[in-house]
Image (tube, helix red, strand yellow):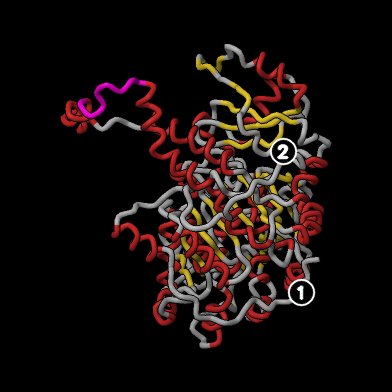
Amino acid sequence: MTKFKALGLQKSLLDAVADLGFETPSEVQEKAIPILLEDETDLVALAQTGTGKTAAFGFPLIQKLDSGSRTTQGLILSPTRELCLQITNELKLYAKYEKSINVVAIYGGASITEQARQVKRGAQIVVATPGRMKDMIGRRLVDISKIDYCILDEADEMLNMGFFEDIKDILSNTPNEKSTWLFSATMPQEVSVIAKRFMHSPQEITVGARNAGTSTVQHEYYVVGGRDRYPALKRLADTNPDIFSVIFCRTKRDTQKVAEKLIEDGYNAGALHGDLSQNQRDLVMNSFRKKQIQMLVATDVAARGIDVDDITHVINYQLPDEIETYTHRSGRTGRAGKSGISMVIVTRSELRKIKAIENKIKQKFISKTIPTGMEICEIQLYHLANKIKDTEINEEIEDYLPAINDVFQGIEREELIKKIVSVEFTRFYNYYKKTRDLNTVDSGERSERRGDRGGEISSNGSVRYFINVGEKDGYDWMSLKDFIRDTVALGKDDVFKVDVKDSFSFFNTDAEATERILATFTEFKVDGRFVNVEVSRNPGGGRGRDRKRSGGNKDGGRSGGGRRRDRSTSGKRRDRKSSGNSSYSGKRRDKRKSDFF
């Protein structure tokens, strides 16, 4: 709290900070709060989603308001209903010790007369979506002609959603003397136009490089044939048993179709797109936040305002038209200081887009191969073993043990372990044993040339390792890479293709480092626990053009993998309902002209 006090916040806000458990201001908060408290100024703040922007403008706004006046003094525009409600709830928490400050949310899908009634009762702060705010202005249900502060939150998202004219109309109803604070992840041309037209000599702060992606996100791409996108998606899910992800499609129709296929194949999936009612959207988002849905398939517009900190993966089932949109997609993971992974499934003809995105976000993509069936079986086998090991014993089973022991009588310990593990493993093995390699030749050749983060590491000469630590031990792909590199004294790019699972992980090095690595991790302990490293039997992610294609059936039917839902009849009905799994009735496709490349 001392660090927040140094920013100039008053006691009532510091008490709220203490209640919320905030200890250290984020970079955007450290830069923005003192500027906004000290001066009546316009501000442009460029920072990625999930960096604490709401507090960066929320605390100064609350501190500067005249709590004795019931007139609307602050207007906050946000792109979606979800984000509008989230900002409103957060501001109420910030202002909990400011008894007379009232915050009202204005958004579509709710009673406009009730919202107007709340504003009329006295709302110093109004948080609104552009469409509903313009409607209320047109009906003269709200007066923003005397506001002192106007905040545009996620400005680039609002403009990407087509709110440019609405925002211009709304701002034209506000006084010239106000302070305008614009917060955005990127600075596309439309945002620059708004800044030049409606702001006066704004100060500018930038957290990270302008228009760049966050450093906590690892970017990967997988090259497959056009017909193999969905089988590739399933394999990526099966390779990450604890996945909690958002999957992006370009159209509402594809979004619904992919979600329905995932549900049919036994995954905890749901759809989020514009054809869903507000009630269906709420059901889906509530299920996602509770992790009842682990794979949320969404369009870019529908996903605006999703604010969930624990998303492990963003999967680009299809690339968007605009690079800025990719930045927003990948920003859904790697939030609040955590690491994340953004995966892109591409065809050979789309490889040029990867380079364009790299140039824009100032980060390199890692070329990876779609895992083979046997690699997935290995990962699922380790996952199952650790799940059994970590399962808490239910003491209620005690009464049944004599009968169970009779069933297992005569079976040796090793054979019993094999049987228990085989119950789940056989399902994966039978499904994947005859599936073919989904990787195109280009993916192997490019992976061989580039290796990790654009390096010159040869995929043919690399070795894949298994290590018995993972997320439960506090590691993510960044920290595990650093741990291995520092422990073995390897170079910056000598450890690559790091895949961290719940209780174990995989990584690659050049073959010449194998002896050093295995020697270092012989009888090696961390905090009294043995950390074991061994060469993986299936060197996933490390093979290039030497990978041989195997014959067999295409991926299809019911998958052997993923996080399976409850197979009871009631559980199946619940999954389908929460996913908004209604038939797609719209016939229009997204016809917005592409200016991506």
What whole-number distance in Å separates the C-alpha atoms at marks 2 and 1? Answer: 54 Å
Q: Residue at 68% across / 28% down in the picture?
A: 482
Q: Is residue 61 above or below residue 121?
A: above
As drawn, which residue projects farthest toward the top?
523
Q: Is residue 498 left or right of residue 441?
A: left
Local packing at callout 2 (Cα closer than 10 Å; few below 14, some 14-19, many 20+) is many
Residue at position x 61%, y 37% from top?
499
Report x, y in % for residue 358.
Answer: 78, 52
Q: Position of residue 182 (x, y in %)?
A: 67, 63
x 58%, y 59%: residue: 230
Q: Amino acid at mark 1?
A: Arg
Q: What residue occupies the far front of the structure in this picture?
A: 551
| Residue hosting label 2 | 543
What element does badge 2 sit on?
A: loop
Magenta-colored segment: predominant secondary structure: loop
Kind of element beneath mark 1: helix
Identity of the amino acid at label 2? Arg
Q: Is residue 411 magenta?
A: yes
Q: Is residue 285 left or right of residue 346?
A: left
Q: Nearer the viewer, mark 2 or mark 1?
A: 2
Q: Position of residue 577 (x, y in %)?
A: 37, 66
404 drawn magenta? no
Please name whichever residue, 144 or 266, is drawn nearer the observer in this view of the structure. Answer: 266
Work out whether mark 2 precedes mark 1 in sequence or the reverse, and give the earlier one.
Answer: 1
Give the residues in magenta: 406-413
Q: Position of residue 179 (x, y in %)?
A: 67, 66
Instruction: Check disc 1 and report the residue beneath it.
Output: 197
In the image, 239 versus 309, the foreground residue is 239
In front: 249, or 190?
249
**Residue closest to the eye, 366 or 438:** 438
Which numbered circle lies on residue 393?
A: none
